[in-house]
Image: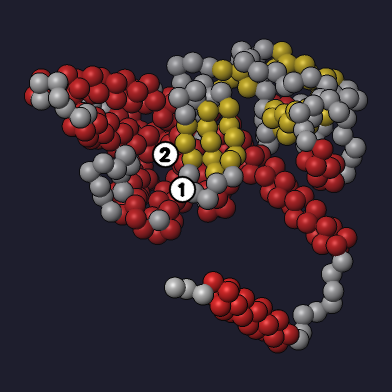
Amino acid sequence: MIDKAMLQRTIFNKFFIIFIAALLFEGCATVKGPQVSSLEEEKAKREIQVRSLQNWVKDVQRSAAVIYNIRKKIPSKDSFGFSGIIGICLTEMKPEYREICEILTSRSLPKTGYLLLPVPGGPAEKAGIKLYDIALEAPPDRLKPNENVIVKLVDRAVEFPAEGVGVKLNKMAIVSADEVNAFVDASKNLYITNNLLKFVSDNDQLAVIIGHELAHIERGHIEKRMGVGLLAGILTGVAEAIITSGRGSGDLSRLVTQVVVSKFSRDQEREADYFGLKYAYLAGYDIEKGSDVWLDLGSGAPASLTKSLLSSHPTSSERLARLRKIASLLKEGKTWDEFEAK
């Protein structure tokens, strides 16, 4: 029979000893510098938040500029109007976020309107719209090439024509994530992680990555992948039902579908690599330097060097070798038309 009172005393004594030991060890740190007040700590916290927002603005403008430079050079069958304005809605802004924005912009922000981030080198910036200008209304969207754009700012109105660009891109967003990644979704939105932008500090490399993602949209990969996955799932489901007389668990269907879609995805990734490199080249970026993005990504993510049957991407080593070879052959005089000749 366990004596509960003795057990409780034993547990208490152990915790008491640990508590005393912690105090002693704390006392061993004799040089800790001056005391910091709560006000000083709060000020430092605000500085960190402002720097974080400032870095986000830089990431947005940097990415948007590369996207714009590539889109205006892509030989697309369709052309879309582009104003070159990114707007942050002030009406929906939380009070703590507004305070950080006001510190960053060195101005008091109104309760309504839009804080503007013009795309560097884009139509709005060329027309005179500056970073952190405030618009009374939402920036225009779904424009046609050369359509007249009027932006009503708090102190003036700016008028300019929308520029024609290729590739239908609905939205671009910088997202905070641990992974190093960029991707497009079924709605033709492009997402870039902040860690990718930290990892890829060179715009020639960033252009190769962004060109790759825009190629997925322009080459219709998203729709094709969804169609192949649906068709493979239907056909393998029927086959499994016949083989197992309707008693199958669905595992075979899922496995075959995954293998088919993965193979299809790898081929699409190779095509997106090729056209992404071409788009970056047409936009004036150095594709020899840009191709080295797979050297940096491959060494930073060595697991990508292990080829898997179900991997949806080629290995970094394969992608690096192929893109370097294309860049080398172009330098020797080969043309894009020769690459694409059947």
Q: Is residue 230 left or right of residue 146?
A: left
What's the residue type where badge 2 is placed? Leu
Residue 306, horizontal then vertical, whole percent? 28, 54
Quarter of the image with the N terminus in it? bottom left
Name which residue lies at 69% across and 30% down. 86
Query: Label 2 belongs to which residue?
Result: 277
Residue 259, horizontal then vertical, whole percent? 23, 35
What's the residue type where badge 1 is placed? Gly
Report how far apart the C-alphas of labels 2 and 1 lie in the structure.
Answer: 8 Å
Residue 286, horizontal then vertical, whole percent? 48, 46
Q: Is residue 105 left or right of residue 161?
A: right
Name which residue lies at 70% across and 18% down. 140
Name which residue lies at 40% across and 56% down. 301
Q: Give the label on residue 290, or none.
A: 1
Q: Is residue 153 left or right of residue 164?
A: right
- Mark 2 nearby-residue class (10 Å; few <14, some 14–19, many ≥20): many
Name which residue lies at 67% across and 44% down. 56
Residue contact between numbered discs 2 and 1, judged by CB atoms under 8 Å: yes
Residue 40, horizontal then vertical, whole percent? 86, 63
Quarter of the image with the C terminus in it? top left
1 w.r.t. 185: above or below: below
- Mark 1 nearby-residue class (10 Å; few <14, some 14–19, many ≥20): many
Q: Quadrant of residue 146?
A: top right
Q: Does the image show residue 108?
A: yes
Q: Give the label on residue 190, or none.
A: none
Q: Does the image show residue 256?
A: no
Label count reads 2
Q: Quadrant of residue 337?
A: top left
Between 292 and 109, the one nearer to me in the picture? 109
